[in-house]
Amino acid sequence: MLSGACAKKPGPEPNPSVTPASTFSQIQRRILTPTCATAGCHASPQDPEYASHQLVLTAGQSYKNLFNVKPVNTLAVADGLLRVKPYKSLESLFYHKLNFDASHHGGKFYGSPMPLGGSPLSVGQIDFVRRWIEAGAPETGMVSDSTLLDDKTPSPGG
């Protein structure tokens, strides 16, 4: 009898020093840094448009500038929006600003869609952000499917 022939062989030990990137760190690396935190936009308080939005989206600054923060957009404030309202993507100005489709806003104008002058985010990228917000917009942990970031389907209105 071959007693060891069907025994399960141990796989490689997990490496505790390798942790998957958090959902927010992926948003930072794959969306905010390349499309928003650029010179002249949301890179620093010295940017020409900073006075109108008062928002810096660089790594290390963006989360605290987004999470549970009241926007400067008066219509968004009047509608009760926050920049990112945990569990409420439709009450998060950040989510609205990423949607180029005007019908998404219910006819309201919360300022120019972002990234300003750039290509709109893909359907997958926008859904990745939406799912992150709907999961509470945590700074750490994985709460959205990273494969959405690879979806290149053009978003409506772009």
Image (tube, rainbow, N blue to C red):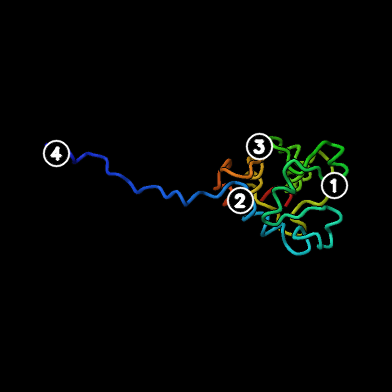
Image coords of residue 50 (percent x, y):
83, 57
Q: Are marks 4 and 2 in contact (CB under 8 Å)?
A: no
**Dot 3 amino acid type:** Gly
Q: Quadrant of residue 104?
A: top right
Q: CA distance from mark 4 to mark 2?
A: 50 Å
The residue at which mark 4 appears reads as 2
**Dot 2 amino acid type:** Ser
Q: Which tag, 1 or 3, sits closer to the chain's start?
A: 1
Asked which secondary structure carries label 2, the reply is helix
Relative vertical location of residue 59 with respect to residue 13 in this rendering, above or below: below
Q: Quadrant of residue 77?
A: top right
Q: CA distance from mark 3 to mark 2?
A: 15 Å
Q: Which tag, 4 or 2, sits closer to the chain's start?
A: 4
The answer to which of 121 and 79 lies nearer the viewer is 79
Instruction: Kindly report which numbered mark, 4 or 2, lies closer to the viewer in this rendering.
Output: 2
The residue lying furthest to the bottom in this view is 39
Asked which secondary structure carries label 4, the reply is loop
Q: Residue at x 82, y 45 (%)?
A: 71
**Dot 1 amino acid type:** Val
The answer to which of 73 and 104 lies nearer the viewer is 73
Q: Which tag, 2 or 1, sits closer to the chain's start?
A: 2
The residue at which mark 3 appears reads as 136
Q: Which tag, 1 or 4, sits closer to the chain's start?
A: 4
